Amino acid sequence: MKRPDAKRMPPRGNAGPRRDAGPPRPSGPASGARRPDGQAGAAERVFGLRAGLAVLDARPKDIVRIGFTQDVRAETAALSAWAKAHRIPCDALLDGELERIAGTPHHEGLVLETRARTWTPAADLASLLTRTQGAAVALDRVRNPYNVGSILRTAAFLGLDAALLGSPAPHPALSPDAVRVAEGGAEHLALSRTTDLADTLGRLRARGVQVVGADQHARSVFARPLGRPTVLVLGHEREGLSERVRGACDALVSIPGAGPVESLNVGVAAGLLMAELVRDRLMAR
């Protein structure tokens, strides 16, 4: 996964845009600090208007530095006022400066530097789902950040409780692009991660959580209610579920189609399956 530009946000400036951001500066507590939960506090970049504003709602104490363009000054007025009240560096920057800081032109006028987000341990995820009779989505090697972001956005919209990310990489995490596409969804779900998804799913099953995998050759998801607590597992964009993950599932379901196209994009499939998973919640609203 390509990392965003490593430049730090410039120091707090005047009201107008800065034309010379100056040399990179250390970001204080966001670099090498330890969080209360014991996780390393390496800095993260959050870019995107809705994604950035959601950080203010969900974890304002993690915000270290803010940069924005004049185009979104009205939308970020509350964020700027909060930053001023809490002595957080907050600068109006030119679009090109913000692009260099974000490492992408798709910053939507807002970039935050934050402390590392908190990840929910698998044991706590099991407790959450059993206590609330909740629902979560798990991703088996789904790597495209746009698919990941879309799934997180839909999960948050539908009121799911959590998302579990599985990857063979040493430290699976969210890319900044996925956070942006999630439009704030990443801040409103309990997020958990694992390098051995099959093992983690087995531990969730042992705690009474049903594990349902998506497989285009399985029975229709509309055949019977899924029930809860449940984790819905989506597989790799082309390969589907791995054999070990498939074997860790209590059941497999599919979305029946009536047209000539054989399959759905994983983000679209996830939306349909998650809606079915929480159908009773949606009907009760």
Image (cartoon, rainbow, N blue to C red):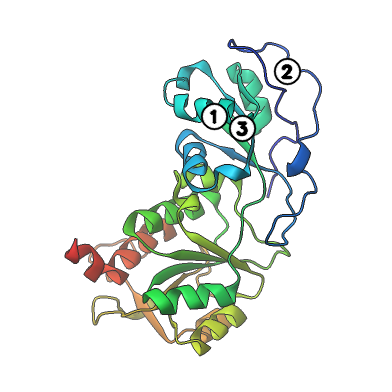
Q: What residue is drawn where x is 73% and y is 62%?
A: 38
Sequence-earlier tag: 3 or 2: 2
Q: Which of marks 1 and 3 is nearer the N terminus?
A: 3
Mark 1 neighbour density, 10 Å: few (under 14) some (14–19) many (20 or more): many
| Residue closest to the far front | 85
Quote the CA–CA distance across marks 2 and 1. Answer: 16 Å
Secondary structure beneath disc 2? loop
Q: Residue at x 51, y 26 (%)?
A: 81
Q: Nearer the viewer, mark 3 or mark 2?
A: 2
Q: In this view, does 282 lie above or below 100?
A: below
Above or below, comparing residue 60 to residue 147 in the picture = above
Q: Would you name the residue on which mark 3 appears?
A: 104
Q: Please name the residue that numbered disc 2 is placed on.
A: 21
Q: Is residue 213 visible?
A: no
The kind of secondary structure element at disc 1 is: strand
Q: In this view, does 176 lie above or below 219?
A: above
Tell me the residue that label 1 is attached to.
110
Circle count: 3
Q: Around disc 3, counting alpha carbons within 10 Å, would you say few (fewer than 14), some (14 to 19), or many (20 or more)?
A: some
Question: Which kind of residue does numbered mark 3 sit on?
Answer: Thr
Label 3 with label 2: CB-CB less than 8 Å: no
The front one of 76 and 260 is: 76
Residue 45's x, y, as percent? 64, 40
Identity of the residue drawn at 34% across and 60% down: 159
Q: Which of marks 2 and 1 is nearer the N terminus?
A: 2
Helix, strand or loop status at disc 3 = loop
Q: Which residue is drawn at 58% across and 77% down?
A: 123
Where is residue 139 drawn, in percent x and y? 52, 66
